[in-house]
Amino acid sequence: MPRYDSLHGTLPMLVLKILARRGRLHGYAITTHVEGMSSEVLRVEEGSLYPALHRMEEAGWVRARWRVTERKRRARLYEITPRGRRQLEAEEVRWRAVTSAVGHILKHA
C-alpha cells in the first residue's frame, strides 16, 4: 500500500486526537503513533509536524513543556488543552461531514 505524506488539513485533528487519548507526547512519538495507527499508510514529516505543533500552540490548542526523559535527554512534550479538546470536537464533526459527502459522491456518481 502506498504511503501518503500529504495530510494537509487533517494533521492538527490527528495530533489532537492522539494527545487526547495518549496524554503528553514528544514530536517523534506523535509521528510514530500516526504512522503506526494508520498501518504505515500515513507519514508525518518533521517539516510538517513541528510547524503544525507551533501553530497549535499559538492557537492555544496544545501546551508544550521541556522535560528530561528517562534516557536523560531533553524533550519537548505536548499536551492538549481544554481549547484543543473543543477544537478536536469541531474538527471531528467537520471530518465526518466531509467524508460522508465524499463517500456519497463516490457511491452515486
Image (cartoon, helix red, strand yellow):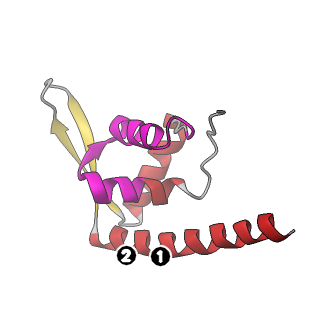
Q: Secondary structure at mark 1?
A: helix
Label at residue 28: none
Q: Is residue 63 visible?
A: no
Q: Amino acid at mark 1?
A: Ala
Mark 1, other Cα within 10 Å: few <14 / some 14–19 / many ≥20: few
Q: Is residue 64 magenta?
A: no
Q: Quadrant of residue 72?
A: top left
Q: Position of residue 63 (x, y in %)?
A: 28, 57
Secondary structure, magenta segment, majority class? helix
Q: Position of residue 24 (x, y in %)?
A: 23, 49
Determine whether, in the image, residue 104 is placed left or right of residue 99.
right
Q: Is residue 62 above or below residue 28?
A: below
Residue 1, relative to residue 20: is it above or below? above
State the residue position of label 2. 86
Q: Report, in whole angstroms, how far the alpha carbon at label 2 lies from the one at label 1.
A: 6 Å
Instruction: Reply yes or no: does residue 27 show up in magenta.
Output: yes
Per the rendered image, the range of residues in magenta is: 15-42
> Residue 71 is drawn in which quadrant?
top left
Tag 2 near tag 1, CB within 8 Å? yes
The amino acid type of the residue labelled 2 equals: Arg
Q: Quadrant of the C terminus?
A: bottom right
Give the secondary structure at mark 2: helix
Which image quadrant: the N terminus?
top right
Asked whether, in this view, residue 28 is left or right of residue 72, the answer is right
Q: According to the image, label 1 marks what residue?
A: 90
Going 38% across and 59% down the picture, which residue do you hit?
17
Q: Nearer the viewer, residue 3 or 26?
A: 3
Could you say which quadrant of the image residue 31 lies in?
A: top left
User: Is residue 58 something one can see in this rendering?
Assistant: yes
